[in-house]
Image: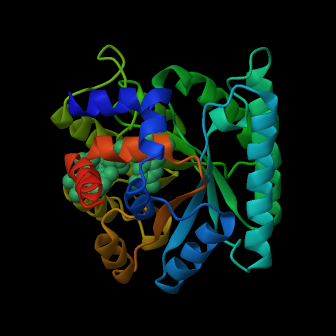
Amino acid sequence: MFRRVLLAASGSDRVRQLVVATPPTRRVVDRFVAGERPGDALDVARRLAGDGIAATVDRLGEGGADLASARESTAAYLGLLDLAEDAGLSGGLDVSVKLSALGRLVPDGGRKICYENAAEICARAAAVGATVTIDAEEHASVEAAHEVLADLRRDHPATGAVVQAYLRRGVDDCRRLAVAGSRVRLCKGAYRAPRDVAWTRRAEVDAAYARCLGVLMAGAGYPMVATHDPRLLALAARLAQEYGRPAGSFEYQLLHGVRPHEQLRLASLGAQVRVYLPYGPDWYPYLLRRMAERPANLALFVRALRSR
Ligand code: FDA
């Protein structure tokens, strides 16, 4: 119920205006968002690199249905990659992109527009030694995202996919994607989805995640285990051992601001760890999804309001 209300609010302009105008919001935002400018994200990426942790940088912004915002978003990613190269940080860097930010929702030709924009980002990433991962969004967009990804992989085979384990189709997606050279991020799923397409109870989602993880770890691809759930992290380590996967043949991915001690602990064990680093002024839907994941985050926000 709590999760449903917050995910609904993430799409509401009225709630957005209220939250964005509330000064203490900043403190909560700062926990999950690296900053407003690309340089802020790269500063955090540099600090993480010092701890042996890699980054995937996400320029916040989604759902724009006009050509101009799709171009602006594409240009921002290209600028970010150039900046990363100048700073000596582009080798091994990943950028996470949402096709909705690259024009998927533009009427007439949105699919082609987002493909062309994503392909331009993939080409620039490859030129500076970085990779791209296509984030997963609402369930209704997943099929189109997989089609665009397949097109991108023809020229840029390292382009990463994201599978949301809460979708009933997730395990089939994992079977299809668990092939040599394929980078696949497995997450639980952060959007609203109806019961006919998604598992909606926590235990069902966790069980689905475990099934998907088994398929990816047994397969020939490069699994990217995106969760903070201690039981699933332990399962990933067990499966890696069972399938004889060395440390560099899969990675753990965690969100900036969530379980930072666990990020350091995993890295100290010699595991490959990557942190998802969002930056940019358009943080509202991202923040609401983080709150929906954990009631304590909302309490943090309410406490900030009271201490005004
Ligand atoms: P779960 O929600 O059960 O949390 C397990 C524990 O982790 C909690 O008990 C708590 O300790 C901690 N925790 C989790 N979330 C927290 C939060 N917000 N604040 C504080 N503590 C928290 N989703 C999607 O739909 N499309 C995508 O492309 C991506 N991409 C992505 C990349 C990466 C690197 C990660 C880690 C996650 C995503 N997600 C995503 C989000 C994902 O689907 C999911 O919503 C969150 O990771 C929370 O689920 P957990 O697996 O962490 O489990």
Left or right of residue 114: residue 32 = left
What x and y, as percent, mark residue 184? 51, 47
Of residue 231 and residue 297, the one placed in the foreground of this image is 297
- Image quarter for residue 62? top right
* Residue found farthest to the left: 203
Relative height, residue 265 to residue 253 (above, below): below
- Does residue 185 appear left or right of residue 110 in this picture? left
Residue 56 shown left or right of residue 6 in the figure? right
Q: Residue at x 47, y 64 (%)?
A: 275
- Nearer the observer, 214 or 279: 279
Please identify the quarter of the rendering in which residue 27 is found. Answer: bottom left
Q: Identify the residue at image location x=76%, y=53%.
A: 76
Of the pair 147 and 43, the residue shown nearer to us? 43
Q: Residue at x 38, y 32 (%)?
A: 171
The answer to whether residue 8 is above or below residue 160 is above
Q: Is residue 16 visible?
A: yes
Relative to 199, residue 233 above or below: below
- Between 249 and 251, which is closer to the camera in this rendering? 251
Quadrant of the image for the C terminus? Answer: bottom left
- Point out the residue furthest to the bottom here: 50
Q: In what quadrant of the picture does the N terminus appear?
A: top left
Whether residue 215 can be seen here: no
Q: Position of residue 129 (x, y in %)?
A: 74, 67
Count the marks: 0
The image position of residue 104, as x and y in percent, is 69, 27
Q: Residue at x 34, y 62 (%)?
A: 258
Query: In the rendering, at what x and y percent does residue 121 appear?
Result: 77, 50
